[in-house]
Amino acid sequence: MDRQAACNAEPGPRRVEDVYRPCAVTIATDQRLQEAAVRMAEEDIGALVVVDGGRVLGILSERDLVRAAADRAGFAWTCAAEYVTPEPATTTLDADLHQVAAVMRKLQIRHLPVVDGGEVVGMVSARDVLELEAGTAAGVD
């Protein structure tokens, strides 16, 4: 279901599959922070899934990049692995969005990798959840 259809759907429980962004953008552990920041800017996203040989090691978010900047890390030579948030919380396609929002609030995070069959298939952000809720509440298409 696309976002517009999700907003126009009958009221009721919404699921991650209604709003998530398929195909999570990934980077390797040996990529530099500068490459990560450029990738985020190019893709207009706030977090990357960090992988090593296809295995998810963590997530690198805008907050992690701010932490690196505050540490005065050299973005041109510091590996993303040094600032990755390890073992991130994840969600599934059939998860209820209210529960996902509660997890995000509790953990104070804005991005959750979406897994299906043990593989990362996308990302859901607080923005995705808010867009659906705002559209549903306002009756916006």
Image (spheres, helix red, strand yellow):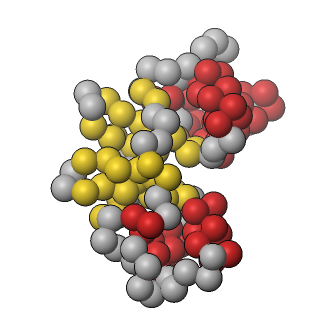
Picture quadrant where residue 134 is located: top right
Give the residue drawn at x 60%, y 14%. 13
Give the residue drawn at x 44%, y 20%. 94
Q: Is residue 29 visible?
A: yes
Q: Is residue 14 visible?
A: no
- Work out whether 84 lies above or below 133: below
Query: Seen from this angle, which residue lies furthest right?
Result: 138
| Picture mark count | 0
Picture quadrant where residue 120 is located: top left
Left or right, 132 with reference to 74: right
Left or right, 86 with reference to 57: right
Residue 85 in percent (x, y) is at 49, 52
Left or right, 59 with reference to 101: left
- Work out whether 98 lies above or below 72: above
Residue 19 in percent (x, y) is at 53, 36
Give the residue drawn at x 30%, y 64%. 28
Quadrant where the C terminus is found in the figure: top right
- Work out whether 128 lies above or below 49: above
Residue 51 in percent (x, y) is at 30, 55
Residue 67 in percent (x, y) is at 63, 67
Give the residue drawn at x 44%, y 67%. 82
- Work out whether 44 lies above or below 17: below
In depth, the one of 24 and 63 nearer the eye is 63
